[in-house]
Image: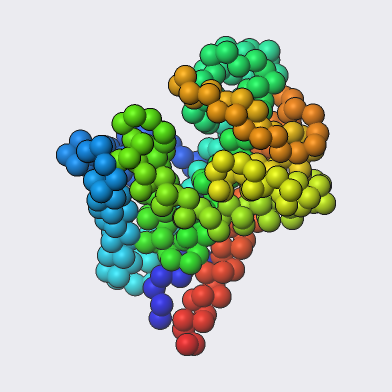
């Protein structure tokens, strides 16, 4: 009996995320991983790619190995399902993502710009200090689109095709990218491996996110058209697919000037509609939930099919 593919465990993990969300706790597995990765960085850091490759290999390889051991030494099928459920819950962020969108919508609907600016860093890395309400709405919609892939579709994809080792390895990759995979004097070379590996790990999930957005969004035809026309224009090989599909589905225009800790980036326009308004945040939240539900269904069916194939192969 194959031990890697557990559709029931995936389904239970999705249900746990829906019920418990992602508690902001210092003992959460992702928080523990982040602290461990930071300590390892302090020992290994050097301004070159080779040290960054070693750092990523230890962190990601160790996470995958932990998943292999947990499944291989689980005493029975019930235990393996429980391990899969807990691992799925630990790496998913769909419910928390939707709630953050709702918090920002609440603040902007109350015309409380300072509260919205204070909340935005929970969702993305842009400097909120000078953003007005429309720009916060745009940042929120774009972040919901990109993180629908990173926090929901991608972990479910890797959980379906590689079980618990895939779940843990993906979350390690994505967490390292957030920690060190960005442009800065310290991480331009050391963080190169983390950024490139994150691009590879998200290549298929980002395109799956785009396809599911077309299927579940309120305007499938426009979502498909904008995805095909604009999805490749984003500087990220993956984020543009998600943002373009959301822009088309919601009938808005994304892209523009983004400021990250003093660094200015110009993003190409995606979509043909007006700039997002506050009401579009609620629509984007509904869309991310719909895409997440569809992704869960696809992951469970895929894991079941792989399990069945392995059993009869």
Q: Is residue 190 visible?
A: yes
Q: Position of residue 210 (x, y in %)?
A: 66, 52
Q: Residue at x 82, y 51 (%)?
A: 221
Report whether 53 appears left or right of 284: left
Q: In the rendered image of this protein, does residue 15 appear above or below residue 299?
A: above
Q: Nearer the viewer, residue 4 or 187?
A: 187
Residue 36 seen in render: no
Q: Which quadrant is home to the N terminus?
A: bottom left
Tell whether 147 sits left or right of 182.
Answer: right
User: What is the x, y in percent for residue 83?
Assistant: 37, 60
Q: Is residue 103 left or right of residue 127?
A: right
Residue 128 in the figure: left or right of residue 28: right
Q: Residue 29 falls in which quadrant of the image?
A: top left
* Residue at the spot 55% in from the left edge and 43% down from the top edge: 236
Q: Residue at x 29, y 50 (%)?
A: 53
Question: Residue at 54% across / 72% down in the picture?
Answer: 304
Compared to residue 8, the image places residue 309 above or below, namely below
Residue 174 sits above or below residue 269 on the image: below
Q: Nearer the viewer, residue 174 or 260?
A: 260
Residue at the left extreme? 43
């Amino acid at each position: 009996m194959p031990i890697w593919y557990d559709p029931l465990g995936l389904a239970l993990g999705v249900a746990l995320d829906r019920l418990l969300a992602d508690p902001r706790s210092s003992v959460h597995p992702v928080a523990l991983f982040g602290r461990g990765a930071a300590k390892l960085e302090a020992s290994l850091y050097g301004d070159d790619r080779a040290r960054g490759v070693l750092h990523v290999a230890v962190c990601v390889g160790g996470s995958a190995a932990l998943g292999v051991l947990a499944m291989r030494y689980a005493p029975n099928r019930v235990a393996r399902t429980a391990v899969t459920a807990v691992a799925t819950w630990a790496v998913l962020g769909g419910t928390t993502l939707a709630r953050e969108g709702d918090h920002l919508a609440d603040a902007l609907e109350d015309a409380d710009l300072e509260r919205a600016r204070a909340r935005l860093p929970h969702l993305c890395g842009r400097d909120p200090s000078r953003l007005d309400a429309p720009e916060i709405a745009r940042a929120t919609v774009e972040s919901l689109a990109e993180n629908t892939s990173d926090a929901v579709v991608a972990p479910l994809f890797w959980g379906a095709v590689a079980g618990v080792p895939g779940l843990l390895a993906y979350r390690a990759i994505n967490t390292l990218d957030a920690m060190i995979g960005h442009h800065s004097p310290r991480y331009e070379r050391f963080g190169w491996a983390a950024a490139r590996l994150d691009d590879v790990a998200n290549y298929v999930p980002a395109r799956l996110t785009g396809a599911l957005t077309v299927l579940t969004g309120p305007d499938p035809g426009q979502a498909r058209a904008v995805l095909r026309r604009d999805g490749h224009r984003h500087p990220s090989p993956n984020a543009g697919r998600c943002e373009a599909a959301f822009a088309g589905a919601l009938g808005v225009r994304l892209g523009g000037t983004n400021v990250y800790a003093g660094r200015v980036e110009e993003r190409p326009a995606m979509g043909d509609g007006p700039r997002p308004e506050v009401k579009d945040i609620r629509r984007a939240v509904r869309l991310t939930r719909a895409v997440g539900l569809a992704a869960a269904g696809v992951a469970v069916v895929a894991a079941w099919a792989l399990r069945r194939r392995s059993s009869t192969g």
